[in-house]
Amino acid sequence: MLKSLKQDKLSNSKGKNNLIHPKLVDKIRNVLSEPFVFPDNILNKLQADPTVWNNYQQFSDTYKRIRIAYIQAAEIRPEEFEKRLNNFINKTKENKIITGFGGIDKYY
């Protein structure tokens, strides 16, 4: 994961490839250095359908972390949480990757 945050990709003297604002680089590295704990409630839903679980296991670790964190971020809003989880389950069942917005798929 940290490989994708190489300093030369974040910024350079000419200002090219500024994927992440320089003020945020250290904070992002700190977050990414901590192990991500995949929530049991989400994993249990994925495991409930063998096709979903099999497809999910084939996805990259980065993609799984980004998608699950996105779902988990909505836990305080139950309707949004269910909407995100169901969308992820449906796309995963079809073995499709959710590309997201703003080019986040380049980190998958």
Image (spheres, grey):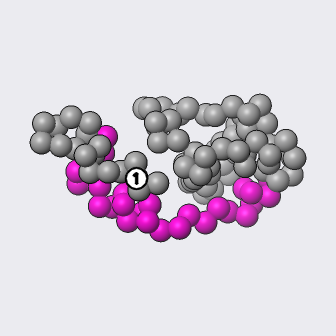
Please identify the dominant SS of the magenta region. helix
Residue at the spot x=67%, y=62% of the render? 39
Total number of numbered discs in the rendering: 1
Q: Secondary structure at mark 1?
A: helix
State the residue in front, 61 or 43: 61
Do we see residue 22 in this rendering? yes
User: Magenta span covers which residues?
Assistant: 19-45
State the residue in front, 107 or 41: 107
Tell me: 101 left or right of 89.
left
Residue 76 screen position, x and y as percent? 60, 57
Tell me: 62 left or right of 26.
right
Residue 10 screen position, x and y as percent? 28, 45
Other residues around mark 1 within 10 Å, as few (<14) / some (14–19) / many (≥20): few
In the displayed orientation, state which residue is furthest to the bottom.
Answer: 34
Q: Amino acid at mark 1?
A: Lys
Residue 52 screen position, x and y as percent? 80, 43
Tell me: 65 left or right of 107.
right
State the residue in front, 76 or 5: 5
Residue 100 screen position, x and y as percent? 53, 33
Residue at the spot x=21%, y=34% of the render? 16
Do we see residue 70 in this rendering? no
Magenta segment includes 78: no
Q: Residue at label 1? A: 3
Residue at the spot x=69%, y=40% of the render? 88
Magenta segment includes 31: yes
